[in-house]
Amino acid sequence: MAYILALDQGTTSSRAILFDHAGAIAAVAQKEFQQFYPQQGWVEHDPTEILTSQLSCAVEALGKAGARPRDVAAIGMTNQRETVIVWERASGKPIYPAIVWQDRRTAAQCKALVESGAEDEITSKTGLVIDPYFSGTKIQWILDNVEGARARAERGELAFGTVDSWLIWNLTSGNHHVTDFTNASRTLLFNIVKGEWDADLLRIFGVPAQMLPEVGWSSERVGEVTTTLGLGGAAIAGIAGDQQAALFGQACFEPGATKCTYGTGSFVLVNTGSVVVRSAAGLLSTVAWLEPSGELTYALEGSVFVTGAAIQWLRDGLGLLDNAGQSEALARSVPDSGGVVFVPALTGLGAPDWDPDARGAMFGLTRGTTRAHLVRAALEAIAFEVRDVVDVMTAEAAARGAADGAAWYPAAGYQALRADGGASANDLLLQLQADQIQRPVERPVVAETTALGAAFLAGLATGVWSSQAELAATWHLDRRFAPAAPDDAAHARWRSAVEQTKGWAG
């Protein structure tokens, strides 16, 4: 039997999943790795640990399935997107730890860019807002703060990459320095309309072009894994940033199809077809994938930074949970949050508020507040955060649909939201979500849609699957959550609390 091996490199763990032709999971291996917080608002990873954890998971998954490298038809890769790694071309050694997408250290740089008047040009070309979330200012920070880095980069001695580039470089023994359109579109350096690195953006951010990877399609043969790594000579044939991979894995192939991934953060994406939709309210225009015809497919995205990470913080930071799986039972033990509102702006606020200086807060605490109320408030916060994004999407659809005439607009307001990611296993959360957005929420049988999307892309490139229609037939519903009446008063309290957290660190 031929398998597709998906390498799913996430923010807190690396995973490897073997999928069969039916899109079913044959084996899974996962390994958490260390998070580093050297200063307030800074988040770093060890690039070598990212690599070794991902390799060990791949070999373990093969072992669990009793599969050999020759049983792998192709490898698909998906990754945490905006995280930055810079390494020496000659030695392959990183010159600084990976700066994670959650990192806020470049807030002052971003503020200076806005004040310089560069915002309109950057946003029009990239579809993004100026925020520390994205890669551009992180690269700039490394070049300006690691001794000799800028001069070395200008001489062509250093390579930059998001995590996909770093892994592929190492998997192919330095023979391929590549990324794909989805990851490139998250750097603030890539023109999503022209589909290329942009010289003006490189000048604005002070990034030498010599550092950049080659940009390719998400579904094509890139190279073969070095045989000494335990994966034989398996072909790497699929690459996509985690959220675009999840959109593909959820079979959201038509304009208007919408998904939300509940992971470390939560990310709502709606397929907008060939239209680059410009949001007036804090949503991002991004590349979804490149069609075999060569036409780019785009998405509109709402990026929420801390959702599942809030549950992790309640577990690790406060010791309120032994494991994340306890959250549902504990939250169900109380009828509501007892008036507690938790704003998990632990790394600032993403869409639609975009405030890197916001900080987390809890409101409404009393002597009667219990840990169950705090956990319930955390689950409600996730549903509120996603509602804020969906509300903006729906409002923009209503306001601009007639003018633009784009196919996604009427559909975006009525289609079900497809849910995936680790927290989508929580039935209470998905019911709260359906209630808040007043749309059905659908959970598929295979909730590992990020990895599945990477597998789909690799399988299309190698003939395991023949078309998107064949892929769509592998999607099966596990459970559908129908909306009940929303608690609008609770959401109003939430919005009031969010406003009070803004600018705190500033």
Image (tube, helix red, strand yellow):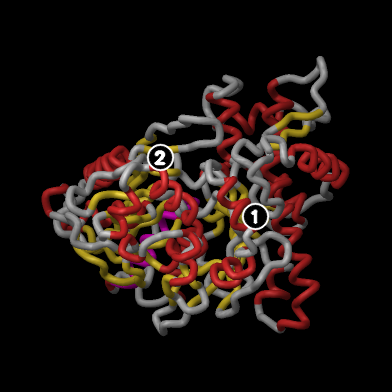
Percent x, y of residue 206: 44, 59
Mark 2 or 1: the one toward you: 2
The span picked out in magenta is 446-461
Task: Please provide percent x and percent y for residue 66.
Answer: 21, 46
Q: Residue at x 82, y 19 (%)?
A: 366
User: Does residue 470 sit above or below 109 in this rendering?
Assistant: below
* Residue drawn at point x = 52 percent, y = 48 percent: 421
Q: Quadrant of residue 427?
A: top right
Q: Is residue 498 left or right of residue 425?
A: right
Check the picture and name the quadrant holding the C terminus: top right
Q: What secondary structure do most residues of the magenta stretch adopt?
A: helix
Question: Residue 177: image x %, image y %?
Answer: 27, 62
x 38%, y 68%: residue: 218
Q: Which amino acid type is marked by label 1? A: Arg
The residue singled out by tag 1 in the image is: 480
Say which of 42 and 222 sits in front.
42
Q: Which residue is mark 2?
A: 13
Q: Answer whether residue 459 is magenta in the image.
A: yes
Q: Amino acid at mark 2?
A: Ser
